[in-house]
Amino acid sequence: MYTTHTVAYLYETHLHTAGVSKCAVSGGAEYVAGYKEKGYSGIIVTDHFYNANCALSRKLPWDEWVNRFCLGYERAKEEGDKQGLNVFFGWEETFDGCDDYLVYGLDKQWLLGHPEARFWTRGEQYRAVREAGGCVVHAHPFRQRAYIPRIVLSVGCVDAIEAVNGGHEDVSYDALANRYAQKMGKPVTAGTDIHDAQDIYYGLLFGIYSEKKLESIQDYVSIVLNNEISSLKMDTARLNYYGTEDVRLPVEIRDENDRIIKKHWKEYV
């Protein structure tokens, strides 16, 4: 999977916008020129969803909440349409302050009709998303931070694993994620997890390569589900990492019904 790319189409899969994601500093439109300059064919806006680090008040009526939630994407798409960069929609949901999932393939109208999404378990989310024609990717599954109480591997509720994530500097997290994906037989993705448009110029950018141009978010869902991502854009350190993976947090394994599986996490890497 980590071979030199020979294809033309490069996509950012993990991006946050200010005003929607609490941790982001750049608005959606601010990313477009930089990604186009760097040779990307498109970006996927994946703002933090209802139970994640979202900037929007949970006291808002659901319709208003959804309309505001989609603004980062809509502003990015408006600018992307002007500059010739494809902009697609997704989101990132969090469970119990622990594990994060990138959801692709659904749209604003679907969200407006599913206010129950706020209360789903991991399994309910997965089944609903798949039924609607989308896919779920486990974002940075082995990330360790002071605010994360434990690592949760929801082995029955994901279609792919984000094996490369630009939001952390410890490459061992990616090494573990890649081994986890291999053990589970899941496709792998890569994303910058970008929150600041300045990082386009002063940081490392990540993403996925596709042999074909993606015309819609459904095209991205298709290459994920069919394991047709051609290669990953990543830095050499992550490609050649052979160090020790240190897991300091408790690790919890859960099945497709959110029940804890009593196995040691090392069985999954």
Image (cartoon, helix red, strand yellow):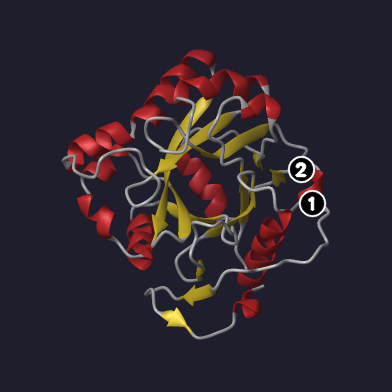
- Element type at mark 2: loop
Which amino acid lies under the numbered mark 1 shown in the image of this protein?
Leu
Q: Distance between the Cα atoms at labels 1 and 2?
A: 7 Å
Q: Residue at x 43, y 30 (%)?
A: 18
Percent coordinates x, y for residue 139 in the rendering: 53, 54
Circle on res. 206: none
Image: 138 above or below 64: below
Q: Residue at x 64, y 61 (%)?
A: 177
**Farthest-out residue, bottom:** 262
Determine whether label 1 and label 2 are within 8 Å by CB: yes
Image: 243 above or below 190: below
Percent coordinates x, y for residue 143 in the rendering: 59, 58
Circle on res. 235: 2
Which amino acid lies under the numbered mark 2 shown in the image of this protein?
Asp
Would you name the residue on which mark 1 appears?
239
Residue in front for this viewpoint, 25 or 3: 25
